[in-house]
Image: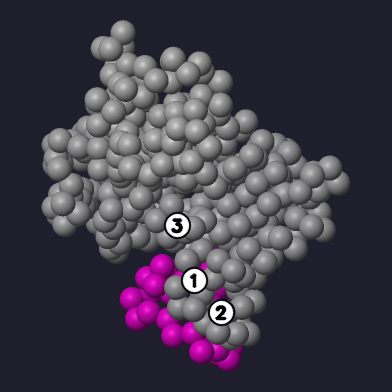
């Protein structure tokens, strides 16, 4: 019921009953509990239906807020999201690279607390922090088991470290899955039966929403799309999709081309930072530089190979591209993927496969991490409020 008001509000009690199938008496009772708890407000708007005007309901945005932190080798993003799903505050900074995890945690935790102050968020309204990382997670220990892009973080108790530094409860998650949660929370998934959020930062992952439910796998580690291997003629495992399509691969190919004397406007970094170099290639590609465009399109085709496998395997009908690596040249990746799906995807014979860029493409995992916390916390608060009135 709370989610219905959040998604469809302003909405009347009658419309809530019609949408949820609950009786009018049940809705009245539950809405009163939500009003008492401060989760829902009467907006002052009236819907005129010819009889008595209907009072409209909406979620009280600042009744609860959550923090989302996305840590990657390329970028780190911290956001504050309110109960209505609106972005209250945001900061995007240089990623972890090879920095000491404790130093990164300290730096990001200070930024989180500064964001809460800047957004004038009451400490009592903050329900927790959603923290997302790239790699295989140990959710019990609150650490990374494996990560290609953050190898120095493996085994580090990052969840506990963030809890100590911020004084807030921390929920750990997978970056691609968090991005998919964000799309579901904002309603982007719509009526899709099988949705995938393809997330590309320093690494590549896939978050899945099947029949309206986030699919997390047996250990919360679903979707390491970048680890798929390309087959070689000799039967041995070839390079992974990540080694062919991810930013570091594009940056390496660009540097090799420049050193070979290829003509291009791309200006590469002096220190060889792959994420700075990828950004330079992406910027040149959207401006029409031939070499840069070819490199980005090659990356997009390698990514499309992996996505097509998922589309055929899971009969997907919705795909969203998200992550900081799609920020600049996302339109090129989108165009290539649509072309490949139209030509090759098996489900196209039966239904459309929608493809789009995320509305929060650079911040998708951070916003999704905050949404992950709100999605878990708000129903529990609402249920407790209703129970107390019973």
Disc number for residue 328: 1
Closest to the camera, between mark 3 and mark 1, is 3
Q: CA distance from mark 3 to mark 2?
A: 19 Å
- Please provide the residue range marked out in magenta: 249-278
Which residue is drawn at the image coordinates 60% and 74% (left, top)?
A: 295
Magenta highlight on residue 261: yes
Q: Earlier in the sequence, mark 3 or mark 1?
A: 1
Give residue 305's quadrant in the image: bottom right
Q: What residue does disc 3 label?
A: 360
Relative to 100, residue 8 above or below: above
Q: Is residue 106 left or right of residue 212?
A: left
Label 1 residue SS? loop
| Foreground pick, 387 / 153 | 387
Label 3 residue SS? loop
Which residue is drawn at the image coordinates 62% and 31% (left, top)?
A: 211
Which residue is drawn at the image coordinates 61% and 57% (left, top)?
A: 356
Q: Earlier in the sequence, mark 2 or mark 1?
A: 2
Q: CA distance from mark 3 to mark 1?
A: 13 Å
Q: What residue does disc 2 label?
A: 286
Relative to 140, residue 177 above or below: below
The picture places residue 34, in percent across and down from the top left corner, at 31, 26
The picture places residue 76, in percent across and down from the top left corner, at 31, 56
| Foreground pick, 389 / 303 | 389
């Amino acid at each position: 019921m709370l989610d219905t008001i959040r998604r469809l509000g302003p909405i009347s009690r009658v419309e809530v009953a019609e949408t949820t199938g609950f009786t009018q008496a049940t809705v009245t009772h539950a809405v009163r509990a939500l009003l008492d708890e401060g989760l829902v407000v009467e907006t002052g708007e009236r819907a005129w239906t010819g009889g008595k005007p209907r009072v409209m309901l909406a979620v009280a945005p600042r009744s609860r807020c959550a923090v989302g932190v996305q840590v990657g080798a390329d970028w780190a993003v911290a956001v504050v999201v309110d109960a209505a799903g609106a972005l209250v505050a945001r900061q995007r900074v240089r990623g972890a690279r090879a920095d000491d995890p404790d130093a990164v945690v300290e730096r990001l935790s200070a930024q989180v607390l500064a964001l809460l102050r800047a957004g004038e968020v009451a400490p009592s309204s903050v329900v927790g922090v959603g923290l997302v990382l790239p790699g295989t997670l140990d959710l019990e220990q609150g650490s990374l088991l494996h990560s290609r892009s953050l190898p120095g973080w493996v085994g580090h108790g990052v969840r506990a470290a963030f809890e100590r530094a911020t004084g807030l409860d921390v929920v750990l998650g997978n970056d691609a899955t968090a991005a998919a949660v964000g799309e579901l929370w904002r309603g982007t998934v719509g009526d899709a039966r099988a949705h995938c959020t393809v997330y590309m930062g320093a690494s590549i992952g896939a978050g899945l929403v099947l029949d309206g439910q986030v699919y997390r796998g047996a250990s919360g580690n679903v979707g390491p799309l970048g680890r798929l291997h390309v087959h070689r003629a000799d039967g041995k495992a070839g390079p992974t999709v990540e080694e062919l399509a991810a930013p570091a691969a594009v940056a390496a190919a660009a540097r090799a081309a420049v050193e070979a004397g290829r003509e291009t406007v791309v200006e590469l970094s002096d220190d060889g930072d792959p994420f700075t170099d990828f950004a330079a290639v992406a910027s040149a590609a959207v401006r029409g530089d031939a070499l840069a465009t070819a490199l980005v399109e090659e990356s997009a085709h390698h990514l499309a190979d992996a996505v097509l496998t998922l589309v055929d395997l899971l009969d997907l009908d919705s795909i969203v591209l998200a992550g900081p690596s799609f920020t600049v040249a996302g339109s090129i990746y989108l165009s290539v993927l649509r072309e490949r799906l139209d030509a090759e995807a098996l489900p196209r014979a039966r239904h459309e496969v929608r493809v789009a860029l995320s509305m929060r493409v650079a911040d998708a995992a951070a916003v999704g991490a905050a949404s992950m916390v709100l999605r878990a916390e708000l129903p529990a608060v609402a249920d407790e409020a209703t129970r107390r009135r019973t």
